Image (spheres, rainbow, N blue to C red):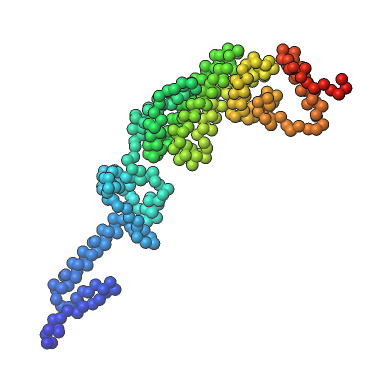
């Protein structure tokens, strides 16, 4: 019994409840040393793979990492498609840096089926450019066969693949080049046709925007409104103001004033369209000819003042006289009720 007690192993419990014998048996000591080294190796590997996030378990996602020459990439376990690229330093970075990598502010690194810029240049933008060309040159009475669903699909894919900024730049550049050609064409117009040609250009461009803006709805909603705090239609109308109207306003305004002083020299509908169009582009242009703009747009002139009522009456009488002298009769006066003095 004493021999058995001497040969027995003296077990000790450490703080992790790992029982290890410290007796005279050499084999038991070797087993404990081997197990400790194995556990130490496993712990070292698990800690070096990815450090834990402070304050809790790291967020997991159903997928797997695979190593490549350019670093590790996250592969979706369902589709097998590449989800995002993760640099080689992501797993060795500090916990705070790893947490920031997976934040919502860096969603561009976790795109599904990322579309390369070459694919955008070679496939998507050429198709969009052809459709924009057809929409810009159409007349309001023409019926051009354009697949709006296909254009809408191209725009949707470009926005989802984070090409919004590139798409917006290409769209504005394309329309700017078109408006520069319109401006050159107007510059060659004779004075007697200038107002009519300007109205055709403005009307045609406005009708084109009624088709372009809706199919670029996703670009407008998720990039222009959310990031630029602007509106697509307002931006495109500003392009017309900058590249067409502002260049020719000094030529157009005297012609409008002259046509307004000579009734029916220009069709009233054309005059109204041009004047209202100029006011919508730049309201400040109304100050260049208040009398002209006040004939088509209310509240251009300052409010009426009681002390100026005689002047207003004199102005109306002068206008009636000018119309009468230009061949406009006052109407059948025989049906007018006779005054009591007659």
In the rendered image, the quadrant that contains the C terminus is: top right
Q: As drawn, is 25 to the left or to the right of 73? A: left
- The number of numbered badges drawn on the structure is 0
- In the displayed structure, would residue 147 be above or below residue 185? below
Q: Residue at x 76, y 19 (%)?
A: 335
Query: Is the residue 19 above or below the residue 210 in the image?
Result: below
- Front residue of 249/267: it is 267
Mark yes or no: residue 254 visible: no
Of all residues, the one furthest to the bottom in this rendering is 1
Q: Position of residue 251 (x, y in %)?
A: 62, 18
User: 72 or 236: which is nearer to us?
Assistant: 236
User: In percent of the image, x 40 and y 37: which residue is there?
Assistant: 156
As rendered, which of 162 and 306 lies closer to the eye? 306
Instruction: Give the quadrant of residue 55.
Output: bottom left
Q: Is residue 155 visible?
A: yes
Asked whether, in this view, residue 206 is left or right of residue 340, the answer is left
Give the image location of residue 133, x and y in percent: 43, 24
Q: Is residue 12 left or right of residue 333?
A: left
In x, y percent, where is residue 221?
A: 47, 39
- 266 relative position to 211: left or right: right
The single residue placed furthest to the right in the displayed view is: 341
Q: Position of residue 243 (x, y in %)?
A: 54, 24
Closer to us: 323 or 285? 323
Find residue 174 and report its image quarter. top left
Question: Residue at point 49% right, 29% down?
Answer: 210
Q: Is residue 109 above or below residue 127?
A: below
Residue drawn at x 35%, y 43% as measured from the top left: 111
Query: Where is the N terminus found, in terms of image quarters?
Result: bottom left
């Amino acid at each position: 019994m004493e021999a058995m007690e001497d040969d027995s192993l003296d077990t000790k419990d450490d703080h992790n409840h790992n029982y290890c014998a410290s007796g005279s048996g050499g084999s038991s000591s070797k087993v404990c040393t081997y197990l400790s080294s194995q556990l130490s190796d496993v712990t070292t590997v698990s800690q070096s793979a990815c450090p834990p996030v402070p304050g809790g378990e790291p967020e997991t996602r159903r997928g797997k990492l695979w190593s490549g020459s350019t670093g590790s990439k996250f592969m979706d376990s369902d589709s097998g498609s590449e989800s995002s690229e993760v640099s080689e330093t992501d797993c060795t970075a500090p916990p705070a840096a790893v947490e920031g990598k997976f934040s919502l502010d860096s969603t561009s690194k976790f795109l599904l089926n990322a579309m390369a810029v070459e694919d955008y240049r070679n496939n998507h933008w050429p198709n969009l450019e052809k459709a924009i060309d057809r929409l810009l040159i159409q007349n309001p009475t023409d019926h051009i066969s354009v697949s709006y669903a296909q254009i809408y699909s191209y725009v949707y894919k470009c926005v989802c693949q984070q090409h919004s900024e590139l798409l917006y730049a290409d769209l504005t550049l394309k329309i700017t080049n078109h408006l520069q050609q319109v401006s050159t064409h107007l510059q060659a117009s004779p004075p007697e046709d200038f107002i009519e040609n300007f109205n055709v250009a403005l009307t045609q461009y406005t009708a084109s925007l009624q088709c372009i803006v809706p199919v670029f709805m996703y670009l407008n909603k998720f990039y222009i409104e959310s990031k630029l705090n602007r509106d697509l239609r307002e931006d495109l109308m500003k392009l017309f103001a900058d590249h067409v109207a502002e260049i020719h306003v000094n030529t157009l305004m005297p012609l409008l004033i002259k046509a307004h002083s000579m009734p029916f020299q220009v069709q009233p509908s054309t005059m109204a369209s041009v004047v209202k169009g100029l006011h919508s582009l730049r309201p400040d242009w109304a100050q260049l000819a208040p009398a002209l703009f006040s004939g088509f747009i209310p509240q251009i002139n300052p409010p009426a003042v009681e002390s100026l009522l005689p002047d207003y009456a004199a102005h109306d009488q002068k206008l009636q006289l000018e119309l009468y002298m230009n061949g406009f009769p006052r109407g059948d006066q025989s049906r007018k009720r006779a005054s009591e003095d007659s």
